Image (tube, rainbow, N blue to C red):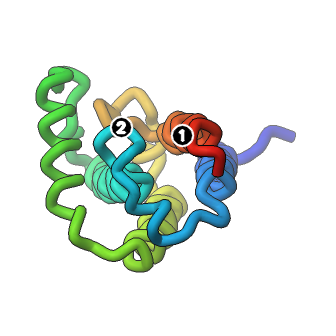
Amino acid sequence: MTQDPRSAIVQSYQEVRAELMAAIDGLSDAQLTDLSFDGWSVKDHLAHLIVWDEIRAGEIARISAGGDCAWPTTMTEDQVESLNTMTVELRRGLSARQILAELATSRQRVIAAIMAATPRGLDASLYGASGLQSTHDSEHAGWIRAWRDKQGI
């Protein structure tokens, strides 16, 4: 018996988020907001992931409703970098506590969108830059682990 594609997608999102949460486990507010990472703090990386969860949840709903992808694969690296920089800067003033709370709810919205998706909404070929599935959390978790190792945390 094959696994329902919806369940497989949800499971993948849960696994990569668990990896991210393990990477930030035990960090203090000071460590979460320390800018020694790469010009961004760990909190900034989390805020960045929240934005992409918000985009992805919207895309799933949009495509499920019969619309076209609003985040095409034709986005240039400069456009993606500008978006990332702008959204991180806009959320930089939010507290670590708020970012952690939003991190949980943003992923819940993605999962809810997947569970409510139509067959069209589950067609990965219709997605652009946001993608239907993502390992983005794993990428950031790896960077956070490397930063922690360098900092001796």
**Position of residue 147 in the picture relative to residue 64 (left or right):** right
Residue at the spot 39% in from the left edge and 50% down from the top edge: 45
* Residue placed furthest toward the right: 1
Where is residue 149 shown, x and y percent of the image?
64, 39
Q: Is residue 100 above or below residue 76?
A: below
Q: Amino acid at mark 2?
A: Asp
Q: Name the mark on residue 135.
A: none
Residue at the spot 41% in from the left edge and 42% down from the top edge: 37
The residue carrying mark 1 is: 147
| Residue 75 position by quadrant | top left
Q: Is residue 2 above or below residue 24?
A: above
Where is residue 124 shown, x and y percent of the image?
44, 33
Q: Amino acid at mark 1?
A: Trp
Residue at the spot 43% in from the left edge and 78% down from the top edge: 97
Residue at the spot 58% in from the left edge and 36% down from the top edge: 150
Where is residue 46 shown, x and y percent of the image?
42, 56
* Count of labels in the image: 2
Q: Relative to the observer, which residue lies in front, 90 or 35?
A: 35
- Identify the secondary structure beneath mark 2: loop
Q: Is residue 77 visible?
A: yes
Q: Earlier in the sequence, mark 1 or mark 2?
A: 2
The residue carrying mark 2 is: 38
| Residue 148 position by quadrant | top right
Marks 1 and 2, how far apart at CA: 9 Å
